[in-house]
Image (cartoon, coloured by chain):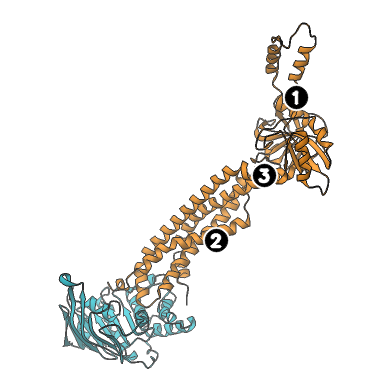
Chain colours: A cyan, B orange
Amino acid sequence: MKPLPAAPPVARGILIEGLRKVYGQGDTAVQALKNVNMQVHPGEVVGLVGPSGSGKSTLLKCLGAIIEPTSGRMQLGSELIYDQGWTVRDLRALRRDRIGFVFQAPYLIPFLNVTDNVALLPMLTGLPNTQARARAMELLTALDVAHRAGARPSQLSGGEQQRVSIARALANHPPVILADEPTAPLDSERALAVVRILHRMAHQAQTAIIVVTHDEKIIPTFKRIYHIRDGQTHEEAGQGVPLD
Amino acid sequence: MISLAGRDIAHSWGKFALTGLGLGLLIGVTLTMAGVYRGMVDDAHALLDNSRADLWVVQKDTQGPYAESSSLKDDVVHSVRGMPGIAAAANVTYFTMQVRGQDGNESRAMVVGMESGNPGEPGFLLAGRQLTRSHYEAVADVKTGFALGERIRIRRHDYTVVGLTQRMVSSGGDPMVFLSLKDAQEAQFLKDNDAIVSERTRTAANPAFNRPGVPGLLDAVQALQTSSHNVNAILVQLAPGLDPDMAAEPIRRWKHLQVFTRAGMEDILVAKLIATAARQIFMFLVILALVSAAIVAFIIYTMTLGKIREIAVLKLIGTRNITIASMILQQALGLGLIGFLVGKVAATLWAPVFPKYVLLLTQDAVTGLAATAVICALASTLAIRVALQVDPGEAIG
């Protein structure tokens, strides 16, 4: 695999302090997140694990600027994006430019080929098609799927689709990537390959990556793990098993 | 920015093509319905053009000869010819009937009785010649299916087709068969032999006509009954430069007849005679437009529902709502365009097969394309509404 192209010099990492999320009001109120504190440094990959209903999805949606927390603070790099309310006006642009998403299923756009699936994000920022495609090809080359650049997502294997999905998440040089169960549909070998790629990309692009997972195969690979139970996070040191 | 709609259509071209085909056939029917109406109007204009008349003189208080029955005595034409500014005037008869060919094939036709070399005679022939003999010759429109030299039967007599003409049709679209005026009068107004014998017996039994003291009265009455001097209208050509209304007025006043100018006759044929049919066709067009809109709305809505996850991903990664709405709108318009092209080709192919004239105008096609675009745009609003309500969080689960 080739190294990633140099990312622009933007602030990296994510800091979360006292994040709360309450659904509903009064007697029917449900406190999904009670007191979440997290910090992920640039180039670091941390695991976020917890049982079903523990608040993982809610936390991911808050981090992804999809739903608004009830209180707390969130900082992307040096920019405070939430402090008892959103401090940025255009959340859509925030998601597009500063947050990368990798899903459990790759959810590639089926009617776009591999290159355009990755190039779509830079295009949405207004980058000319040729430059966006060139950027996509660099990422696909780095992730070793450039040979499938013209293929449709349905023509790719599960591992290839997930690599394209990672390339898409990296397309706009985001300071943070949120990966939701990225290895769930993969066998052990491919799952470890994906995690290896995430570690390498985090290091090369100086991106902070949060991996939500239940996958026992990959949990030992993290150096730091956040456990979430009943809406509260607890930090633990991971085994950090080398992948190479 | 790439065209998401175009890529989706290219990806699911089979689905779009089949849907477009179905929609296209519906649009083809819509265009054909419009063509049927245009054909009826054109038939009416052709009827007026082919008569080569400036004025139509008909029975008083009627709107004949095409919309209502009209009967005039055939000697009235002489007094009309004597009116100032009249260049030519000729009697005509019109009646619609089944005309039988020599091999038994029948054609519904309007039989026209006319005077050779006068208004009412076909203006041009595709083949053969005009009528030159006083009896038993006919000129037929090619749409009747009759051939030159064919013997056709009208009432009691056989006629030889000596000429063929084209686009000579009644306001109802029936092709015309031209006979000499005398032949047509006989065919239209005279009864068959049995009826004549019966009528003679009835007249002879009437003491008012069969008076012993008045010799020759019965013969005169019976002769009157077996001859006809009625026509349906007089076609008038005016001297060049004469105002038709000014020429019509003295005929109305002094001859106690009804006179229609070209504008008046157009009003009768287009605004009155085919008005009901036009409203009927308009209703069909409205219903077809509604059905087309419902189909496009349903298809685009279903397609959008099938892409909810992709739309959620697009929204999550920062695609603007207007881009997603534009994608759905473009797909609806693309479907409409495919449908319109299929419909236009289908209508063009099947229009000549219709028994009546179907006139497909470019102007109607342009209107149809615009209407299709508007319908598709409106039909896509439901799907756009659904797409804009998709929660980007659905991509995460």
Q: Residue at x 58, y 52 (%)?
A: B347
Q: Residues within 10 Å of mark 3 (few under 14, many from 20)?
A: many
Please report whichever mark, 1 or 3, sits nearer to the chain's N-terminal start: 3
Residue type (three-letter) at the residue carrying disc 3: Ala
Residue type (three-letter) at the residue carrying disc 2: Ala
The numbered mark at residue B44 is 3
Which of the 4 quarters of the picture holds residue B214? Answer: top right
> Residue B360 at x, y = what percent?
62, 52
**Residue A112 seen anywhere in this rendered image of the structure:** no
Which of the 4 quarters of the picture holds residue B363? Answer: bottom right
Which of the 4 quarters of the picture holds residue B101? Answer: top right
Front residue (pair A10, A132)? A10
Chain holding disc 2: B
Chain holding disc 1: B
Label 2 secondary element: helix
- Could you tell me how far apart the alpha carbons at marks 1 and 2 are, in whole angstroms? 56 Å
The numbered mark at residue B370 is 2
Q: Residue at x 64, y 40 (%)?
A: B172
The numbered mark at residue B81 is none
Front residue (pair B125, B7)? B125
Label 1 secondary element: loop
Seen in the image, is B164 located left or right of residue A45? Answer: right
Chain holding disc 3: B
> Residue B361 at x, y = what percent?
63, 54
Please report whichever mark, 2 or 3, sits nearer to the chain's N-terminal start: 3
Seen in the image, is A167 located left or right of residue B281? Answer: left
> Residue B209 at x, y = what percent?
73, 12
Say which residue label 1 marks: B228
- The reply to whether the C-beta atoms of the residues labelled 1 and 3 are less than 8 Å apart is no
Labels 1 and 2 share a subunit: yes
Q: Residue at x 74, y 42 (%)?
A: B165
Residue at the far front in the pictured view: B253
